[in-house]
Amino acid sequence: MNDFASNTVKPQMNSRLHRWSFRKFQKIIEYKARLSGISIVYVDANGTSSLCPICGAKLSLNGHGTLKCKKCGLMLIETL
């Protein structure tokens, strides 16, 4: 998937990717994951930016642009 964000992708390919519907893109990812034996898990996006992706505990903002999980110690840089 890194190639989708790559600056080396031709402009024509970027145009084609931007015209895809989200659902079609989702189905392609599901198909490719199945071929590779990777399971897909859908989660509700509500609150995910405030929960630790490792242990699920609530993240706390330290005031310096970083988030820290008090349970497992994971540190993340806050983004917009």
Image (cartoon, grey):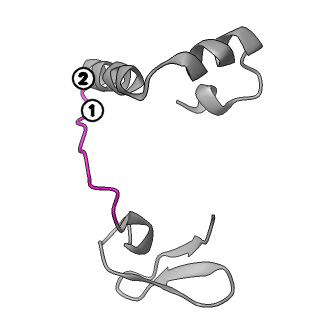
Q: Residue at x 61, y 79 (%)?
A: 66
Image quadrant assignment for residue 36: top left
Q: How many numbered callouts? A: 2
**Magenta segment, which residues?**
37-46
What amino acid type is highlighted by mark number 2?
Arg
What amino acid type is highlighted by mark number 1?
Ile
Residue 55: give x, y in percent of width and height. 30, 72
Q: Secondary structure at mark 1?
A: loop
Image quadrant assignment for residue 35: top left
* For residue 41, above or below residue 79: above
Residue 15: give x, y in percent of width and height. 66, 15
Is 42 colored magenta in this rendering?
Answer: yes
Circle 1: is it few (<14), some (14-19), or many (20+) Cα within 10 Å? few
- CA–CA distance between discs 1 and 2? 6 Å
**Can you identify the residue that label 2 sits on?**
34
Residue 13: give x, y in percent of width and height. 65, 12
Q: Which mark is residue 38?
A: 1
Q: Residue at x 44, y 22 (%)?
A: 21
Is 33 left, or right, of 20 in this rendering? left
Is 16 left, or right, of 73 in this rendering? right
Circle 2: is it few (<14), some (14-19), or many (20+) Cα within 10 Å? few
